[in-house]
Image: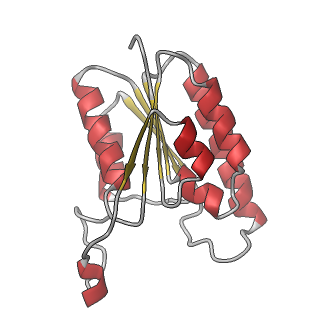
Amino acid sequence: MKQGYIQVYTGDGKGKTCAALGLILRACGAQLRVYLAQFIKHGSTCEIRSLKTRFPEVTVQQCGRGCFIIGKPKPADIAAAQKGLARLRHAMLSGRYDMVIADEANSAVTAGLLSVRDLLQVMNDKPVGVELVITGRRAHRQVIQRADLVTEMREIKHYYHQGVGARPGIEK
């Protein structure tokens, strides 16, 4: 890739991770190599199982303990996020990947797992030929200013509010 950009998908609506997964599918179709780091999340969701078994050009790294962060984060959650950010940074600078995705990195900043300074440093160090994608609610204004493309997902209506839980193949 000659020129990679920084894309941010944020907002309270559904679709941030789905947008990143769509970019992965498109990148694989173009024979690009992808590194996906998922912050906060952990577990074998449908999309993770599919990526691991059907897309060898995608490296998946989950950097969370799979629990909600309410209030002050636990040291184990901070350590997992910091380790994940170090791995993402290494992957981004390695020359092995054309696209690097920091899924839920904005949420990790909001939760206090990562500092906005840490995320901005990754953005500033991005090599020219790498596409960097950052997802998660409540993107910090400095992250938005630094990005080349920002999309905000806004919830208008969601069946979750009528008691419908996450469904396999759709939300998980």
- What residue is rendered at 24% in x and 21% in y? 30
Image position, residue 147 (x, y; %): 50, 36
Front residue of this view, candidates 154 and 167: 154
**Colour scheme used in the picture?**
secondary structure
- Can you tell which quarter of the image residue 89 is in? top right
Residue 78 seen:
yes
Residue 99 coordinates in the image, percent (x, y) = 42, 28
Q: Is residue 9 above or below residue 163?
A: above
Quadrant where the N terminus sits is top left
Foreground residue among 119 and 139: 139
- The count of marks equals 0
> Above or below — where is 123 with respect to 22?
above
- Residue 61 relative to residue 125: left or right: left
Q: Is residue 163 visible?
A: no
**On the rendered structure, is 165 left or right of 137?**
left
Quadrant of res 87: top right
Please state which of residues 88 and 23 is positioned toward the viewer in this rendering. 23
Residue in view at x 30 percent, y 85 percent? 161
In the displayed structure, would residue 39 be above or below residue 95? below
Whether residue 27 is situated above or below residue 151 in the rendered picture: above
Question: Where's residue 7, x and y in %?
Answer: 43, 37
Q: Residue at x 58, y 44 (%)?
A: 143
Q: Position of residue 53 (x, y in %)?
A: 30, 41
Residue in front for this viewpoint, 157 or 142 = 142
Residue farthest to the top, as pictured: 2
Quadrant containing the C terminus in the rendered view: bottom left
Of all residues, the one furthest to the bottom in this rendering is 162
